[in-house]
Image (tube, rainbow, N blue to C red):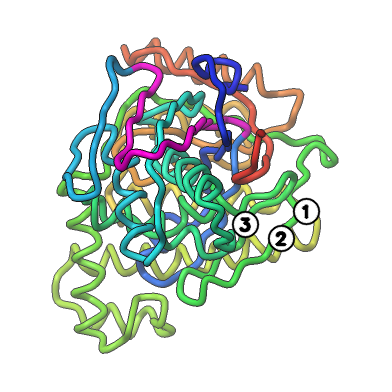
């Protein structure tokens, strides 16, 4: 674990928060819909020391120098995710102590595995621990989301922070993004001879760009036209599409409505104990992201096509889009063969070689010491 790479202490508090993959349910979170992520074994670890002087100093593996800021300073760059947590906690009325923070992480950045949420949730856990504040885990995702939305300026939904905070080993997190109700859905693939292979396409993306925000705006505008609080409330898809004149908006709505149903169908299949049944749902999700939401790129489409051709039960891009990772549901003894097929397809296309690794659902935010 990355905790071993923390600079020499002593630390008053050390916490870890994982990255996440979303099994299914993409761009449904900010439409008050349903998502089904799970926490990764890959974690961000934060060590903290309380100090009497006001202000915060943070260092991070991979970045030169330290960033120091006070309560009224606006911070840019990577440290904004730390300063945003301080800001969100103070906005919520919490007295955040001055601290020195050190960050190390093995969550890949720019791969759609929610490295930013892992930082936010681990920093929040350390600061709350240093302050002696008992803020329930169920409350923390909203605070971390506010840090990312209002301080950093990324219009993300609450899924990433929820998965990073609330994930449980051997389970996927079924989250209703309107009510914030959660259910831990058993997701033990090894018992069924299956595995999730994650392939990092090496096509990086960034959420703080116009494409993500444009799709969110399109969904909000469609909801107004359809006179619903959010697209989650659309029950007659054909009727809704008939009321929309803009073809792009129609495609966006179709993705969100059908994707919500795919999440519900996936949860039903997992409750019934047959994970193979979710394969076609994963593939249909990817096709919808590719054709209706238009957020895939050639690299991720190539991963999906190659994995399916090599025998995967299903495959889909995970994360906000325009790059990042693909999940493939495969027989456990076929992981190497599927990875080899993807690498061959990338070589033929002249793409940068991908990374691939098998993941199992891991624990959410937890204390190291």
Within 10 Å of disc 1 (Cα), the crowding (few <14, some 14-19, many 20+) is some
Residue at mark 2 = 269
Closer to us: mark 2 or mark 3? 3
Residue 77, above or below 278: above
Q: Earlier in the sequence, mark 2 or mark 1?
A: 2
Q: Residue furthest front?
A: 52
The tag on residue 274 is 1
Res. 194 image quadrant: top right
SS class of the residue under badge 2? Answer: helix
In the rendered structure, does residue 57 fall within the stretch colored magenta?
Answer: yes
Res. 63 image quadrant: top left
Q: Residue at x 44, y 47 (%)?
A: 286
* Magenta stretch bounds: 41-62
Does residue 150 appear in this view? yes
- Label 2 and label 3: CA atoms lie apart by 14 Å
Residue at mark 3 = 173
Q: Position of residue 192 (x, y in %)?
A: 82, 41
Q: Earlier in the sequence, mark 3 or mark 1?
A: 3
Q: Residue at x 57, y 19 (%)?
A: 339
SS class of the residue under badge 3? Answer: strand
Q: Image quadrant for the C terminus?
A: top right
Q: Earlier in the sequence, mark 2 or mark 3?
A: 3
Q: Residue at x 18, y 74 (%)?
A: 221
Residue toward you, 43 or 157: 43
Does residue 282 appear in this view? no
In the rendered structure, does residue 279 fall within the stretch colored magenta?
Answer: no
Q: Residue at x 58, y 42 (%)?
A: 314
Image side of residue 250 versus residue 313, left or right: left
């Amino acid at each position: 674990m990355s905790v071993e790479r923390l600079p020499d202490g002593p630390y008053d508090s050390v916490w870890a928060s994982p990255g996440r993959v979303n099994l299914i349910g993409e761009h449904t979170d900010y439409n008050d819909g349903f998502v089904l992520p799970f926490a990764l074994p890959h974690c961000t670890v934060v060590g903290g020391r309380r100090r009497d002087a006001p202000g915060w100093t943070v260092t991070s593996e991979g970045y030169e120098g330290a960033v120091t800021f006070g309560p009224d300073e606006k911070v840019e760059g990577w440290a904004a995710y730390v300063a945003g947590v301080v800001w969100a906690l103070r906005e919520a009325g919490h007295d955040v102590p001055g601290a020195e923070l050190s960050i190390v992480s093995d969550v890949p950045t720019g791969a759609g595995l929610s490295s930013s949420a892992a930082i936010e949730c681990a920093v929040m856990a350390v600061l709350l621990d240093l302050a002696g504040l008992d803020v329930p885990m169920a409350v923390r995702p909203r605070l971390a989301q506010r840090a990312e939305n209002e301080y950093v300026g990324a219009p993300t939904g609450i899924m990433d922070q929820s998965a990073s905070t609330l994930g449980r080993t051997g389970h996927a997190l079924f989250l209703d993004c309107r009510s914030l109700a959660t259910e831990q859905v058993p997701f033990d693939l090894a018992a069924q001879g299956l595995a999730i292979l994650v392939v990092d396409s090496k096509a990086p993306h960034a959420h703080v760009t116009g494409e993500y925000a444009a799709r969110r705006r399109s969904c909000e505008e469609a909801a107004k036209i359809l006179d619903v609080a959010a697209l989650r409330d659309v029950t007659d898809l054909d009727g809704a599409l008939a009321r929309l004149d803009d073809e792009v908006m129609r495609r966006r709505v179709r993705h969100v409505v059908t994707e919500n149903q795919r999440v519900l169908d996936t949860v039903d299949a997992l409750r019934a104990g047959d994970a193979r049944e979710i394969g076609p749902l994963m593939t249909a999700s990817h096709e919808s992201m590719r054709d209706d939401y238009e957020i895939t790129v050639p690299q991720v489409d190539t991963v999906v096509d190659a994995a399916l051709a090599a025998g995967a039960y299903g495959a889909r891009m995970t994360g906000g889009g325009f790059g990042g990772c693909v999940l493939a549901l495969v027989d456990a003894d076929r992981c190497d063969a599927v990875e080899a097929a993807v690498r061959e397809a990338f070589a033929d296309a002249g793409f940068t070689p991908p990374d691939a690794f098998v993941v199992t659902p891991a624990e959410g935010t937890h204390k190291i010491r």
